[in-house]
């Protein structure tokens, strides 16, 4: 019988035949109508290559066929005892593959079982090298069988193993994805005093779900919500069981959540273990598996037949503009749920509401919003990840965890197989080299400025000058300079012909992207336009990552000369672009890597844009790259350091680069004040007003008119308190909290403020203490605000009457002034201007 369906997930199981272990590939598929089915393939043998090491040490060396035969005999006799198992090659074959474009003779070693491959790899001797032995078995399968996730396959099958055994599998053409079943979930716990919940002590009180059956792929479908809530004086045994049954009944294709790998799944598994409940939610009835990395910091969750996607991992890698990547911030950034439209609860409030029993509707709304946000974030982020999964031939749950370098390597691995290339071994070299050219920015305020970017500069350079590991020519091998491109400054040479491995792939990708963008201009269907847009975005991401990959010492195709030559040509081109711009009458006020910022002396908008278009055309004519107008700024200011500026666009948007206070040891007030200062300068062109605004904030701070939450600093406790070697501020705060029976578990975010030196004075009925003394180490004066019973102005009062005074001098000198001076120092202000104002205001309150 012939079966057609879309490949959703892939893994393998172990079967025993004739006393030997065999791998049985499982292809989890879905028909056009949404029917789930599994195809098994037992015909694919795991393998790797063995080639003489000399090929990678000296490209001019040849190895005789007789030597290859001797090496074949040696590999055939490798025998490794591992426990009760004896591991040896199933067979060894002579093969021919290209190494850096040159056809070479080597060996293909076929193993009995996938896990035998790494054992045999380690057993090969020193004069040969094992290649492609680190490719996962199921990835190797998809590459060799030429199939991709989320594309339709067809198979000739017979029934067996509780499914369908394939005798032949092939890829079909592009088709719209079938309906997919998608589930988002989030767990809520109630821990006393709002501390980090512990699965050993704190039950799950709510499991919130948002789910849907899409119309096609991720698109469309009605979203539904479901809450599993614990009852009065009841632990979480029932709701965990109900959640497990719900997942098994719904049979999702994709499960999503935010930070679920490191938190929700781990917590659920431990609570289920305590109750003796199996999390057997795999589509084959198996339990989910959680594996922890060697460092203990990363968790991988695997569910048979279900793609588990932690959206936090995508946000952490891709959403660089979201500084603090909370679920709420990411949802707001992507426009799926505004902060003002959701319920906000602090951990302590969750506990108080749950234990009191009143107002639980707020808690239910809070939990529902979390799951709904996760599902809607998935709708935004997953289409691109699905396209990457297709291109890279990797399951979706692997793609979302891959760095850009690993993604490029996955693409190269598949392309190498198609072209008969073998993946070279990794090299240990990790030397530095000169980077991009930077023209320092002209400090100060500028009007009517145009920024121009070279579109895909580095990929275009690599294509134009045939930069690739297989086209590099060592200096002593250059016979005729007319046959090579020679990079400026570094003098690395690359053959003009034939086209290199990198050039072939990059050119194909760039041509494909141009064709997709051409189709986008003529399509009438919004759905088709979105699909094409996702495809071109995916290609852009991969092509732009190629240069970074070539410079990554962990890459199989790493060659330092490729990276050096690319940046050398980049420097030459950007310098020439600056020269042309200046000859046309522009002032070039900043240049960096692949972009320049220019303005005309008369500052007329229309003339500036017209001349910028002429500049773009002239430079694009001279170089094999396109220089595009990216932005027109009504006003922009530079601090004088590279990558540090703020600008106002024509549409009124403010763009800030490199000035933001980002680290976790800045309070919200410092960030807020800096943003407001930038806004005043750009929109009103009034630096004095910005400075006066800062002075007014300082005045309010000293007067106790600023909410304490805006002054809190949040730091995460990454390990047990006792394991910290130095007394950091958040650790000191956690220790003080512990003295007041408020426990922070590992992973907790600790909100603390800096107070004046702690004394034993008690507050009077007005909450005013006696002596106050500032100074001492900042870490010794970190106070955890969650143990406060009452806050009056700048005074923090505990339940026993102890009083702590906020160190306003710290906030003025170490928070507000440093944040605003990143901007205001450009305009001649110094620290003393604001410190003097602070001292005057402080004296009124002493």
Image (cartoon, rainbow, N blue to C red):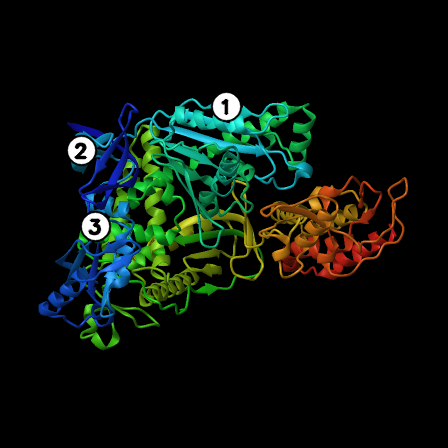
Q: Residues within 10 Å of mark 1 (few under 14, many from 20)?
A: some
Q: Which residue is mark 3?
A: 112
Q: Which badge, 3 or 1, is on the more N-terminal residue?
A: 3
What mark, if any, has residue 155 been given in the picture? 2
**Front residue of this view, candidates 301 and 574:** 301
Q: Kindly report the distance in space between the C-alpha atoms of the residues bearing marks 2 and 3.
A: 24 Å
- Disc 1 on helix, strand or loop? strand
What mark, if any, has residue 226 been given in the picture? 1
**Front residue of this view, candidates 727 and 370:** 727
What mark, if any, has residue 522 been given in the picture? none
Q: Furthest residue to the front?
A: 84
- Disc 3 on helix, strand or loop? loop
Rendered residue at 70%/54% (across/down): 732
Q: Is residue 707 left or right of residue 155?
A: right
Give percent across and percent down for residue 291.
43, 46
Q: Which badge, 2 or 1, is on the more N-terminal residue?
A: 2
Query: Residue 578 occupies which quadrant of the picture?
Result: bottom left
């Amino acid at each position: 019988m012939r079966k057609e369906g879309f490949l959703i997930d892939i893994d393998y199981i172990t079967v025993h035949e004739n006393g030997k272990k065999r791998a049985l590939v499982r292809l989890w598929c879905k028909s056009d109508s949404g029917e789930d089915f599994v195809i098994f393939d037992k015909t694919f043998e795991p393998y790797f290559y063995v080639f003489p090491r000399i090929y990678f040490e000296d490209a001019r060396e040849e190895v005789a066929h007789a030597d290859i035969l001797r090496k074949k005999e040696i590999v055939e006799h490798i025998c490794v005892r591992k426990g009760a198992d004896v591991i040896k090659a199933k067979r060894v074959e002579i093969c021919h593959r290209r190494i850096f474009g040159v056809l070479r003779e080597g060996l293909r070693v076929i193993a009995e079982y996938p896990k035998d491959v790494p054992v045999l790899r380690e057993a090969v001797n020193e004069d040969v090298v094992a290649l492609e032995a680190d490719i996962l078995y199921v990835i190797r399968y998809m590459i060799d069988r030429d199939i991709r996730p989320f594309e339709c396959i067809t198979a000739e099958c017979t029934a067996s193993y509780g499914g369908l055994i394939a005798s032949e599998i092939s890829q079909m053409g592009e088709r719209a994805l079938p309906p997919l079943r998608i589930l988002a979930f989030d767990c809520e716990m109630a821990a006393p005093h709002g501390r980090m919940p512990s699965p050993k002590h704190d039950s799950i009180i709510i499991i919130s779900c948002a789910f849907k059956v899409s119309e096609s792929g991720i698109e469309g479908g009605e979203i539904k919500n479901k809450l599993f809530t614990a009852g009065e004086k009841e632990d979480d045994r029932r709701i965990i069981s109900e959640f497990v049954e719900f997942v098994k009944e719904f049979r999702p294709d994709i499960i999503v959540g935010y930070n679920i790998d490191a938190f929700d799944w781990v917590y659920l598994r431990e609570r289920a273990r305590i109750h003796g409940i199996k999390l057997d939610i795999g589509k084959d009835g198996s339990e989910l598996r959680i594996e922890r990395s060697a460092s203990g910091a990363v968790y991988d969750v695997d569910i048979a037949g279900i793609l588990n996607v932690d959206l936090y991992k995508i946000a952490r890698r891709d959403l660089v503009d979201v500084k603090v990547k909370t679920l709420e911030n990411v949802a707001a950034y992507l426009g799926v749920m505004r902060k003002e439209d959701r319920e906000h609860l602090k951990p302590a409030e969750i506990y108080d509401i749950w234990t009191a029993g009143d107002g639980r509707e707020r808690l239910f709304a809070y939990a529902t919003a979390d799951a709904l946000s996760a599902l809607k974030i998935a709708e935004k982020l997953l289409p691109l990840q699905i396209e990457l999964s297709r291109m890279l031939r990797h399951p979706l749950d692997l793609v979302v965890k891959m760095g850009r370098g690993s993604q490029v390597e996955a693409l190269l691995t598949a392309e190498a197989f198609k072209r008969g290339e073998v993946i070279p071994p990794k090299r240990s070299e990790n030397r530095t080299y000169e980077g991009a050219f930077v023209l320092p920015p002209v400090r100060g305020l500028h009007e009517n400025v145009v920024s121009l970017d070279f579109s895909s500069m580095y990929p275009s350079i690599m294509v134009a000058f045939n930069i690739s590991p297989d086209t590099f020519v060592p200096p002593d091998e250059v016979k005729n300079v007319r046959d090579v491109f020679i990079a400026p400054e570094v003098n690395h040479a690359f053959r003009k012909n034939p086209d290199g491995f990198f050039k072939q792939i990059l050119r194909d990708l760039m041509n494909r992207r141009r064709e997709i963008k051409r189709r986008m201009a003529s399509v009438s269907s919004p759905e088709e336009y979105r699909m094409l847009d996702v495809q071109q975005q995916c290609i852009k991401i991969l092509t732009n990552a190629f240069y970074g990959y070539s410079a990554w010492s962990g890459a199989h195709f790493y060659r330092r000369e490729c990276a050096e030559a690319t940046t050398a040509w980049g420097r030459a081109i950007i310098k020439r672009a600056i020269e042309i711009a200046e000859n046309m009458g522009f002032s070039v006020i900043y240049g960096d890597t692949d972009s320049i910022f220019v303005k005309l002396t008369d500052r007329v908008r229309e003339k500036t844009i017209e001349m910028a278009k002429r500049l773009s055309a002239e430079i694009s004519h001279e170089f094999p790259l396109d220089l595009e107008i990216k932005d027109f700024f009504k006003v922009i200011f530079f601090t004088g350091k590279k990558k540090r500026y703020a600008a106002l666009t024509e549409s009124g948007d403010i763009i800030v680069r490199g000035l933001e206070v980002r680290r976790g040891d800045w309070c919200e007030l410092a960030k807020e004040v800096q943003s407001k200062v930038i806004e005043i300068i750009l929109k009103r062109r009034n630096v004095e007003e910005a400075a006066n605004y800062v002075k007014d904030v300082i005045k309010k701070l000293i007067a106790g008119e600023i909410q304490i939450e805006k002054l809190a600093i949040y730091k995460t406790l990454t390990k047990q308190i006792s394991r910290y070697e130095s007394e950091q501020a958040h650790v000191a705060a956690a220790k003080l909290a512990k003295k007041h029976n408020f426990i922070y578990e590992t992973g907790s975010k600790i909100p603390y403020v800096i107070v004046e030196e702690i004394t034993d004075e008690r507050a009077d009925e007005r909450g005013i203490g006696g002596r106050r003394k500032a100074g001492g180490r900042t870490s010794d004066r970190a106070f955890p605000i969650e143990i406060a019973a009452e806050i009056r102005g700048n005074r923090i009062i505990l339940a026993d009457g102890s009083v702590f005074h906020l160190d306003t001098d710290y906030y003025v000198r170490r928070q507000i002034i440093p944040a605003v001076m990143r901007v205001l120092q450009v305009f001649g202000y110094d620290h003393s201007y604001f410190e003097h104002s602070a001292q005057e205001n402080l004296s009124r309150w002493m």
